[in-house]
């Protein structure tokens, strides 16, 4: 456990978080190197029985220092924009281990990815197939492709992060896949090397994955029967983490046990695209209580972090545990922890039992994924600093934004 109390003060590994705030201020994201490494190695161990590639989902946390840590561990990468590819390159990643997902790849993005020589495009529609075919023919280059199929499986997760139902925008109907693979086979500059499927994020139940695997591996066999031999099966990501104490997410080993029967006797390589389950519980957000506001109906802890810093509670009504950085023996009360943004939807947590006062530091937990990456400058607020902790050392990996940086690209016309 990376974040724990020592002498009543919360630490990140062996770093006192109060000292870290003195150095870098608040709001501030803090990541644990040890946690990220341990989570990645859990996938390595669970998948070691097969030929496999762990393609970290860059969208979960795209700081280049975090990406560089994963590069050193041997990770591949799943990207959904050309900007994420540029981050992987700057982090020292191997472009030959990159898969490019996403439903609306622009022509310039495809060209850049082709020039850089990424491993595989995850195609999400026949329109994208036609575009990729035209561009590769024009450039006279060859590309590996994998078709993302939509198996119409309910992931039983939040509707905004469910991606495997027919009404979702992702992938092609699995019932149309055989015909589309035959279209790919007719393209002189494209080679179908895999199949891809991702049914959603924050999965706490493995039974939807069982249903998904049944459909996807049946498709693999059908393709083999017509002479199309795939080299890899990309099973996506989505494994959940614990946000609330009552949640019991499956382990990576349990995930592998669900996959194992489908891999028996097969030579295909497994690609997997974890994001949240690698970095999610490896991050916290530090924020300071600016004011305590008591009304007849509510107690509010008014803090200096806001929905622009951490969007998940406002967007998904997501729960994140919130704890004081310093444990005290004072009387606790229920507080809504809210930020300074001019929106009623600006909250980090509601009805939390806290013993705090003006000036207290709070830690918002499990924000290593979809935290800073979803932050914005709404209300002209500067984006937070990011820090990576390694044992008793802390490294600033993103400086706090300045107003000069924020306003540099704006122009007043003559």
Image (cartoon, grey):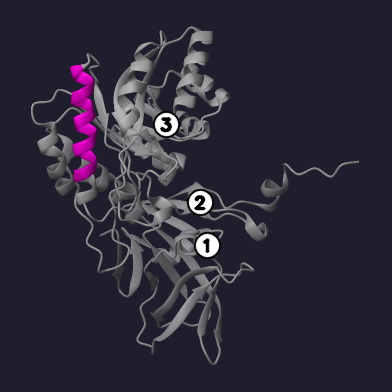
Q: Quadrant of the N terminus?
A: bottom left
Mark 1 and mark 2: Cα distance apart in space: 15 Å
Residue assigned mark 3: 124
Majority SS type along the magenta span: helix
Determine whether 180 is above or below 398 in the image: above
Q: According to the image, label 2 marks what residue?
A: 374
Specify few, some or many for label 1: CA neighbours under 10 Å numbering under 14, 14-19, or 20 or more: many
Q: Magenta residues?
A: 210-225
- The residue that appears at 87% across and 42% down in the rendered structure is 413
Tell me, yes or no, whether the two marked residues, 3 and 2, touch with CB atoms within 8 Å. no
Q: Which residue is mark 1?
A: 27
Q: Earlier in the sequence, mark 3 or mark 1?
A: 1
Dot 1 and dot 2 residues touching (CB under 8 Å): no
281 w.r.t. 333: above or below? above
Say whether disc 1 or disc 2 marks the residue closer to the N-terminus.
1
**Mark 3, other Cα within 10 Å: few <14 / some 14–19 / many ≥20:** many
For marks 3 and 2 on the same chain, the one whose residue lies earlier in the sequence: 3
Q: Circle 3 sits in a helix, a strand or a loop, which is it?
A: loop
Image quadrant where one finds the C terminus: top right
Q: Taking 245 as reference, is 144 left or right?
A: right
Residue 294 among those drawn in magenta? no
Q: Position of residue 67 (x, y in %)?
A: 40, 38
């Amino acid at each position: 456990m990376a974040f724990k109390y020592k002498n009543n003060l919360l630490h990140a590994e062996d770093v006192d978080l109060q000292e870290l705030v003195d150095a870098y201020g608040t709001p501030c994201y803090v990541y644990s190197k040890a946690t990220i490494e341990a989570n990645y190695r859990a996938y390595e161990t669970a998948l070691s029985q097969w030929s496999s590639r762990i393609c970290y989902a860059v969208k979960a946390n795209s700081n280049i220092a975090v990406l560089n840590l994963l590069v050193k561990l041997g990770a591949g990468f799943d990207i959904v924009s050309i900007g994420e590819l540029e981050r992987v390159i700057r982090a020292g990643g191997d472009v030959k281990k990159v898969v490019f997902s996403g439903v609306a790849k622009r022509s310039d993005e495809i060209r850049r990815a082709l020039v850089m020589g990424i491993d595989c495009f995850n195609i999400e529609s026949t329109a994208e197939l036609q575009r990729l075919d035209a561009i590769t023919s024009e450039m006279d280059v060859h590309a590996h492709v994998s078709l993302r199929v939509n198996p119409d499986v309910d992931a039983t997760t939040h509707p905004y992060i469910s991606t495997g139902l027919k009404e979702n925008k992702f992938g092609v109907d699995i019932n149309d896949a055989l015909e589309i693979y035959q279209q790919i086979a007719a393209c002189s500059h494209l080679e179908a090397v895999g199949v891809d499927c991702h049914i959603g994020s924050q999965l706490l139940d493995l039974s939807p994955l069982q249903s998904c695997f049944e459909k996807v591996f049946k498709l693999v066999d059908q393709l083999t029967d017509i002479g199309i031999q795939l080299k890899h099966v990309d099973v996506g990501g989505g494994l959940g983490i614990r946000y609330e104490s009552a949640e019991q997410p499956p382990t990576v080993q349990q995930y592998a046990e669900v996959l194992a029967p489908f891999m028996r006797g097969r030579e295909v390589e497994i690609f997997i695209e974890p994001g949240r389950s690698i970095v999610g519980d490896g991050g916290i957000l530090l924020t300071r209580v600016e004011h305590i506001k008591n009304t007849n109906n509510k107690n509010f802890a008014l803090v200096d972090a806001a929905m622009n810093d951490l969007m998940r509670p406002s967007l998904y009504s997501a729960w994140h545990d919130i704890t004081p950085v310093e444990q005290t023996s004072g009387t606790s009360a229920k507080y809504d922890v809210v930020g300074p943004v001019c929106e009623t939807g600006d909250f980090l947590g509601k009805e939390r039992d806290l013993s705090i006062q003006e000036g207290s530091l709070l830690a918002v937990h499990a924000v290593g994924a979809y935290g800073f990456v979803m932050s914005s400058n709404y209300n002209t607020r500067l984006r937070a600093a990011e820090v990576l902790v390694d044992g008793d050392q802390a490294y600033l990996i993103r400086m706090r934004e300045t107003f000069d940086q924020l306003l540099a690209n704006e122009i007043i016309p003559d």
